Amino acid sequence: MKVLIRADASLAIGFGHVARCLTLAQALRKGGAVVTFACRSLPGNALAQIAEQGFPAIGLPSHYPQDPVPSDIEASIDWQADFAAVQAAFTSQPAFDWLLVDHYGLDARWQQAARSMAGHIAVIDDLANRQHDADLLLDQNQTANTAAYARLIPAQCQALLGPHYALLRPEFTGEPIVIAPQIRHVVVSFGGVDAGGETFKALDALAAFPQLEVDIVAGAANPAWAQLQQRAAGQTLWRLHRFVSDFAALMREADLFIGAGGGTSWERAALGLPTICIAVAANQHANAEQLALMGVHRYLGLAETVSVQHLQQAIGEMSADINVRRGYAQHSRALVDGQGARRVAAALLTRCLQLRRATLDDAQLLFDGRNAPLVRRWSLDSAPIAWEQHLSWLTRTLQRPDRLLLIGEGPGGSVGMLRYDRSATQAERAEVSIYLFAGQEGMGWGQALLAMGDRQLTQHWPDVVAIDATVLPGNAASIKLFRQAGYQQADTHFVRIL
């Protein structure tokens, strides 16, 4: 599967759009996709960082003749000239399977034109303020809801909304941080640019707490690096970083984070790291405010309304109350589990999912899949299957006219198994069984398999009009799967009318 990502970074825009797209690109690459980036060559662009992570990065013009002024403000862009530049850069290449755009200045007009270059269009948005012509839309903010996008996306567009889909790197999964009785270590980071200089405000506030160990992550593109060095000079417990190779590890050592309301909000939440948040852009305010209402972090407001004294007071109050910090950690972890990038990648990859008939060559694959602990736990017969028994079953199964055994194949390999058994007494009905192979859980493959299975079943047995399924009590994941797939539930029995 070939994917093109259109996103920009600059001193004015920041690094956030490209950062989250890189996270998604890595998840897509693990799933077997080939990903390319197209970015304008603006001051402070991320072309080098993209290339360092192994992705081709095409530099587009830094400005276009009809751009509004200033040209590096994200919402100010000549969309026609931009699309023409993207199109010209890829004239000699075959069409992409997906073209994903993460840019506030590009709307349905650009996306509709881009359909000439890709089979499907995906959009990452945070604002819900413009029309989109997309097959998939992602808004990972807590404020995202179906009503906000009801008139902005086509009816058939798949909307992935909320922090369940937050694009986080794998290092932000795993165990949460331990909430210490006292705050000893603080991390300060306002993104890769911090054009407003909020880091200085944080340092002025932290100067009142000389006992605290402070790591300041200023970002490689921060234009005030020399001034920050001067401000940190003489502070023996302060460390100034231009680049941190493992930001998650640094955050895990911290007791408190002071930062902005952008994409790092989800990284902090996944770790359960107590945070004092300041919105550095107007589009961060609503989401940061909503997270505060949910008890995820302490939100002080838009940067221009927050003084050094306000921040200093908040640090003191957080230091003095371990229960408040524990509450922030608990609510954060309940909201974000760190698997969002895998889910979004799967939503894109499922468009390239294929179902095929199983063969004897799949014996080992199915043997390992059926005997996986999670699959056995929720099977009607939870006992391990012996190899000879399994091989005999598979041989008979492939010869049975009343059984259809299918394997789901994604771009990165096999993802799961579907089995349909036609009823011996009611020929118009069939029963479905499904399981995913180890490592494929929680990515959305199940719904895609069932949807494709419906179509293949109808072609194989045109007279079947109903599909039954049985789920063990307590198997919440399967219950949710069948409900979302359109099955009607009666106790542990599900049925779907075709």
Image (cartoon, helix red, strand yellow):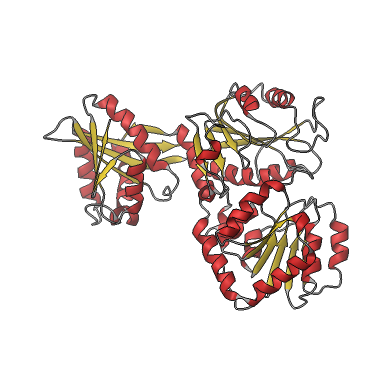
x and y, in percent, of residue 452 in the image: 36, 32
Which is nearer the eye, 357 or 429? 429
Residue toward you, 404 or 256: 256
Work out whether residue 349 can be spotted.
yes
Residue drawn at x 24%, y 53% as measured from the top left? 385
Residue 260 in which image quadrant: bottom right
**Quadrant of the rendered image containing residue 266:** bottom right
Left or right of residue 207, residue 415 in this image:
left
**472 relative to 214, above or below:** above
Residue at 86% across, 69% down: 233
Judge left or right: residue 313 versus residue 421.
right
The image position of residue 92, as x and y in percent, is 65, 21
Residue 6 vs 218, above or below: the answer is: above
Apparent side of residue 263 relative to residue 160 in the rendered image (left or right):
right
Specify the quadrant that holds the C terminus.
top left
Q: Could you tell me residue 419's position as x and y percent? A: 27, 39
Residue positioned 74% across, 38% down in the render = 74
**Percent x, y for residue 235?**
82, 73
